[in-house]
Amino acid sequence: MNIARVLAKNSTSVAVLEQNSIGWGASSRNGGMATPGIKQSIGTIFKRYGREKGRLFWQASLDAIDLIEQIVTEEGIDCDWVRNGHVGLAFKQSHFEHMKQRAAWMRQELGYKLQSIAPSDLRSEIGTDVFFGGLVDDYYSGGLQPAKYVFGLARAIAKYGVHLCENTRVTRIEKQPNGFNVQTSQGVLSAKEVVVATNGYTDMLVPQLKPKIFPVGSYIIVTEPLEPDLQKKLSPKGRMFYDSKWFLNYFRLTPDGRMLWGGRNDLSVDLDLIESADRLRKQMVHTFPELHDIPLTHSWTGQLGITFDLMPHIGRVDGIHYAFGYGGHGLSIATYLGTEMGLLLTGQKTSSPFADIPHQTMFFYRNKPWFLPFAAQYYRFLDWVS
């Protein structure tokens, strides 16, 4: 929808085709956390693409968070946006040592300042003793209610004249001399340009895209509202949190005082929600024993889109534009790349560092990610030995 926003503000006729209802996918089901960085580690990015491009990618991740704030302000979207910072938590002592080294490197290379918090001081940030220290981002990270953001964005672009076509499945895209015919469950549309923005829900509509991205499930539970004193005890400064495991947990207090707890110890997209809620609850209570008797009110899942190089991409195949591969940073990076794509299509920009990244593919993957159970076992092993 951010692509549509830029195009419509540039007097372009735009239709957004959604197979289900607006916001049906992970765009409304995520944890509402916008944090610096992308899925691939910044150290690996520097080694793979060089310092100059590495800094461009990093700055884009910061600009993406600023862009959310700009859009929320300009469009008057009531989505509980707050710039409250985050804490990265060390699951093991060895993780904390590595985190401190990474923080020193990021300060030197990027000017990005993280405050190191020793285990003895961690209670000033989080009401538990299970972690071995942490790194605090006191400013850049922000949080919001993702469904409110998506629905607010939909209302905003509708005011600009964008046609929002819900329950409209695209079944075929046919190239024509002057554009495309887009066949849907509701009829046929003609378009000069087509953008596929399906991320973790990418299917065989454009067969060339499917081998470039695969879906991974992420799962969330939410408690009933907590008493104010308990909220203050668990999260004294209202931060957002994530830990250092490969199968990480991420969590925060919601604006109405609930504990939102997300994560995975499985990569499947179809894990039973009762089973996933039970797993997540055990992790949550291990961290916060005070929540043992607090009822859960919601449990849900959404699909991340992961690329083999762990990088987001924008590009074009057979004249069809695409943007995907946010890897759990979709709130900010999808907002940024959607806007970037809109600027490219309207000629307001001529290039993007995310358009120049060669795709990494694997010979063993064409349609179904059969390898995910094996990858899950590998990541469990890494969490055990690291």
Image (cartoon, rainbow, N blue to C red):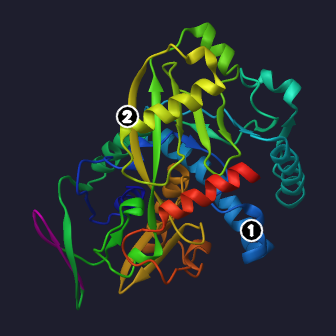
Q: Residue furthest bottom?
A: 177
Along the viewing direction, whichever of 56 and 246 lies nearer the viewer: 246
Vertical order, 88 against 40 (above or below) = above
Task: Where is residue 280? Give x, y as percent.
Answer: 51, 34
Q: Looking at the rendered structure, which numbered label has been put on residue 248?
A: none
The magenta segment = 179-189
Q: How many tags in the picture?
A: 2
Residue 181 counted in the magenta span: yes
Task: Where is residue 291? Give x, y as percent.
Answer: 56, 17
Task: Where is residue 41? Give x, y as percent.
Answer: 71, 61
Vertical order, 312 against 270 (above or below) = below
Residue at (60%, 78%) from the top-left corner? Answer: 357
Residue 200 lies in quadrant:
bottom left
Q: Which residue is mark 2?
A: 274
Helix, strand or loop under label 1: helix
Vertical order, 266 against 191 (above or below) = above
Helix, strand or loop under label 2: helix
Q: Identify the main secondary structure in magenta.
A: strand
Task: Where is residue 288? Give x, y as percent.
Answer: 63, 22
Q: Looking at the rendered structure, which numbered label has been put on residue 44?
A: 1
Residue at (54%, 52%) from the top-left corner? Answer: 328
Residue 76 showing in the rendered view: no
Instruction: Give the amino acid type for the residue marked by disc 1 in the picture.
Output: Thr
Q: Quadrant of the N terminus?
A: bottom left
- First reached walking from the N terminus: tag 1 or tag 2: 1
Residue 42 showing in the rendered view: yes
Residue 222 counted in the magenta span: no
Residue 110 lies in quadrant:
bottom right
Residue at (63%, 18%) from the top-left corner? Answer: 289
Q: Nearer the viewer, mark 1 or mark 2?
A: 2
Instruction: Give the amino acid type for the residue marked by disc 2 in the picture.
Output: Ile
